[in-house]
Structure formats: C-alpha cells, structure tokens
C-alpha cells in the first residue's frame, strides 16, 4: 500500500484578488445591507454588490435576529480585512 503525503507552506499570507478585497470592504459597511420581509413573515438580510445588485444572505424569524445577523456579518468581514494586513504582534520579549 502506498501513502501519499503533501504539505504546503507559505512565506507570506495567501493573496486575495482585488475584486474580493473590494467586495469585503463593501460588505463590511452596514450601510450596504438591508432587511426585507418575505411573504411568509420571515425577514431576509441582503447586501448590495459592487454593481448594485441585491444578494440574499440569511433568513430570520424576527427583525432583531436579522439585524444581529447583519452585525455579525459586518464584524466577520472586518476581521477578514484585518487578517489581510498580516500578522498582528501581540507580545514581544527583551
């Protein structure tokens, strides 16, 4: 029996395309989100793309739940943008 192992290492952060970075910057702003009420009574969160199209993301039972989902998404994309800046020094030694 033959086993195949593959490892990968990077000398730098994985590179993200400019288009992806622009989208993340766009959806990291709460003003680019909205909540719509569906015919079944649920609330749907949507974000606007760079070409001004609305994309549905999540559905929630309450408007408060939908707004919390948006807040979580904004926080998520903000963290992704921080990650692209590279490692953050948290402690140094002398």
Image (cartoon, rainbow, N blue to C red):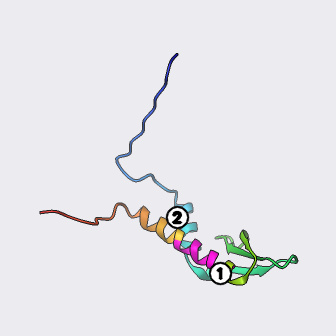
Asked if 61 appears above or below 6 in the picture, the reply is below
Of 53 and 40, which appears nearest the observer? 40
Left or right of 75? Residue 70 is right
- Counting from the top left corner in percent of width and height, residue 26 is at 57, 73
Question: Which residue is found at the position 47% from the left and 68% from the top?
Answer: 79
Q: Distance of mark 2 from mark 1, alpha carbons?
A: 24 Å
- On whether residue 74 falls in the magenta region, the answer is yes
- Counting from the top left corner in percent of width and height, residue 56 is at 73, 69
Place residue 23 in its image quadrant: bottom right
Q: Quadrant of the C terminus?
A: bottom left
- Residue 39 is tagged as none
Left or right of 61? Residue 69 is left
Tell me the magenta residue range. Answer: 66-75
Q: Determine which residue is flagged by label 2.
A: 21
Question: Which residue is found at the position 49% from the left and 65% from the top?
Answer: 80
Q: Give the mark toward the camera: 2 or 1.
A: 1
Question: Which residue is found at the position 52% from the left and 73% from the top?
Answer: 75
Left or right of 22? Residue 36 is right
Of 62 and 73, which appears nearest the observer? 62
Of 1 and 32, which appears nearest the observer? 1
Asked if 49 appears above or below 13 in the picture, the reply is below
Place residue 73 in its image quadrant: bottom right
Asked if 48 appears above or below 87 in the picture, the reply is below
Q: Determine which residue is flagged by label 1.
A: 67
CB-based contact (under 8 Å), mark 2 and mark 1: no
Question: Which residue is found at the position 44% from the left and 52% from the top?
Answer: 14
Please name the predominant secondary structure of the magenta segment in the image. helix
Tally the numbered discs: 2
């Amino acid at each position: 029996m033959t086993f195949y192992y593959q490892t990968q290492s990077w000398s730098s952060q994985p590179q993200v395309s400019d288009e992806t970075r622009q989208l993340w910057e766009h959806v990291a702003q709460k003003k680019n989100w909205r909540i719509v009420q569906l015919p079944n009574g649920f609330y749907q969160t949507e974000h606007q793309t760079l070409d001004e199209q609305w994309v549905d993301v999540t559905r929630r039972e309450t408007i408060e739940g939908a707004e919390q989902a948006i807040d979580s998404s904004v926080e998520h994309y903000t963290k992704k943008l921080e990650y692209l800046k590279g490692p953050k020094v948290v402690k140094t030694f002398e």
